[in-house]
Amino acid sequence: MIIKDAVDKKKYSLLLLGVFALIYLFIKVLTFYAHSLIVLEFAFIAMIFGLSPAYFLREVFKFGNLIGWLVNSSVLGILFIPFLFIILGWLGINLVFVYSISFLYICSFVGIIFLFIFVDDNSIKYCSGLNGLARIDILFYLIIVAYTLILTLLNFYRVYIQWDAFTFWGLDAKYIFQLNRLRDPALDVFGAFRYTAYYPVYYSIIYDLYGAVAEQYANWINVFLNFLALLLVYNNACRKNFVHKLFIITMLTVVSYIAVFSVNMLSMYADVLCAFILLLFMKILTADYWFDPETYYKRMLLLLLVAISLYFIKSPFLFLTLLLVILYIFYDLYLLLKNWGVLTRHAEFWLVLAVVTALYFMRFYYFAFVLKIGSDTPINDLYSPRFSSLYSTIDYAVELIYWLVNKSPYFAGMWILGALSVFVVKKNRMDKTYSYVYWISFFVVFIYCVLYIINQSDLTSGSLVRYCAIVIYLIPFMFIHIEIKLSRVKTFGLVATLLIVLSYVFIKTMTPMPLFEQFSLSTGSYNVILKKESRIAEKTLDISGDAARILIVDDFSNDALLGNMYLDAIFVRYFLMFNSVGGQYMISPNYLYDYALSQSADYILLLTYTNTFDHCERMLVEDHNYLIKINGVESLSTDECVFVNDIIFDLSK
């Protein structure tokens, strides 16, 4: 009888636990037959990890039904997990990296027990319902799920190689996974790498799930982030009419397609995360909030953590963090001024400020005194003006606009649509949320374009598109807050157009992907798609041993400078990351040997030799790869090859 009464009191909580248990069981069965899909367990972990925080923060990060709760839970899991691992890593508590999955499940279980014991069952019942949803909403949610499934298939179809995965994100994730700690000065691959491990932490945890470095599968984290961004936007559209909802869902699919190319969704790049974080900040900032001194600290904590996370992801985004903090203060200025005395009497207010300040100084200390990197946010990263004539500046600006439109036409079209929307919004009815989202979107794109014009930076890297495209989720979010009222004829025309666009995006996304082939075409690892470079690394270590210090140089180009920044070199550096020394460098061939000695290198790995060094024709064959053991004695004769006293291994044989 006692057990029955206890069950009756907690029946909705038990039902929710049962649902989670079934989801977990389903994932385990699915991944037993398709091991490549084990990345889905990370999504489940993020959701249950954030379940309790989402309930605790519901007054400031609102949800009205079960879908909203689970979305908010996943979002907060994604936000908080990297902070937790980074802070513990900075404190030297590295066991969390050794047992990352168990640690996350324990934390999640503690949060669920807290809900089970301290939260009234009626509250769980309300949060677990489907309040405020119409039948058409279920259809639109299914469209989001369907498009995410297509992106998932696309992600698993092949490995998408991109530059920064081998110079930043992939190296850091691999380091954390294999050594179970944050990077230290011993890792000499990066040079002055000023980013924290906030983004690589996701990958290292997913690698723990696989028990191996599986970059292709782990890249799905970006698809998941995109999925959460779409849900965050659409959750605000549930109370709109059918046409408005269809308009938003069409924009969301277009934005997702744009993200594949503009922010490298299917590669190991952090720009999807940055766009997601920017959307999250604006959603929390502009949400309806009735001031309560007992809950305001939650709003303050969440907004400041979201803002500083941009700085943790990429240090040059410090200016964006500061911009968002200023925007938050301005948005809440009336509340802050009116209630300043009340707020400052609450210890939580000062505790939040202390926590955020401590995070900043912990980061500063770690970079300055542990990694021994000087200025972690050099002004040159953003502002290094090139003084040119007015004509040259105008010519560059025209070239930039033309380049942006041609490089990413879908993003350019979406952004122009967003920019022009201000002309169709009635000024006397302009929504406050629309105004703030509009101007932050416009300013981010504008400031990056202006900085590029002032610096006249090289456009060929394509980075400008990624920087500008972090506003992609804000554009459909902005359009939620305008009115769509049309005549019947115009409504029919708009619906027909939207359905055509929606169908086009689905077909366009699926076109390059043979859906009926094998689900995954590789083991999920870069060493499959980069067999040549992986094999060079294996041969090198077979000769040198695992502890050797190796200076890698790519002689592939006819450039006057040698270095390790060409594609062959960055791929090999990735596989030899624990042996590579010298950071990222470009140097004259005449100084290469001296540079290797200055870096205490044991070997020089010379890739694709092209007769760069004088008098080496008899020792080195063109287009071969060589591992050269340095004896530390340079040739004394100018008529001799610089490597005459060294032991040379031909890796091309």
Image: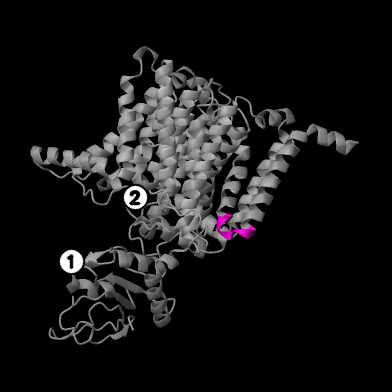
In front: label 1 or label 2: 1
**Does residue 279 sit above or below 149 in this rendering?**
above
Identified at 46% across, 22% down, the residue is 336
Instruction: Point out residue 374 in the picture as x, y percentages from the top left corner.
Output: 32, 53
Q: Quadrant of the N terminus?
A: top right
Q: Which residues are magenta?
A: 32-38
Secondary structure of the residue carrying numbered label 2: loop
Identified at 40% across, 25% down, the residue is 494
Instruction: Point out residue 116 in the picture as x, y percentages from the top left corner.
Output: 72, 38
Residue 33 sits inside the magenta stretch: yes
The figure's colour scheme reads one colour
> Is residue 15 shown to the viewer in this render?
yes
Say what amino acid the circle numbered 1 marks: Asp
Identified at 30% across, 37% down, the residue is 412
Instruction: Point out residue 362 in the picture as x, y percentages from the top left corner.
Output: 45, 48
- What label does residue 96 carry, if any? none
Residue 29 sits inside the magenta stretch: no
Say what amino acid the circle numbered 2 marks: Asp
Secondary structure of the residue carrying numbered label 1: loop
* Residue pointed to by mark 2: 376
Residue 346 lies in quadrant:
top right
Do the residues bearing badges 1 and 2 touch, measured as CB atoms within 8 Å? Answer: no
Say left or right for 597 vs 59: left
**Does residue 501 sit above or below 176 in this rendering?**
above
Q: Quadrant of the C terminus?
A: bottom left
Q: In the image as oriented, which residue stretches furthest toward the right?
A: 1
Work out whether residue 139 or residue 193 is closer to the camera in this orientation and state it.
Answer: 139
Work out whether residue 612 or residue 142 is closer to the camera in this orientation and state it.
Answer: 142
* Residue pointed to by mark 1: 559
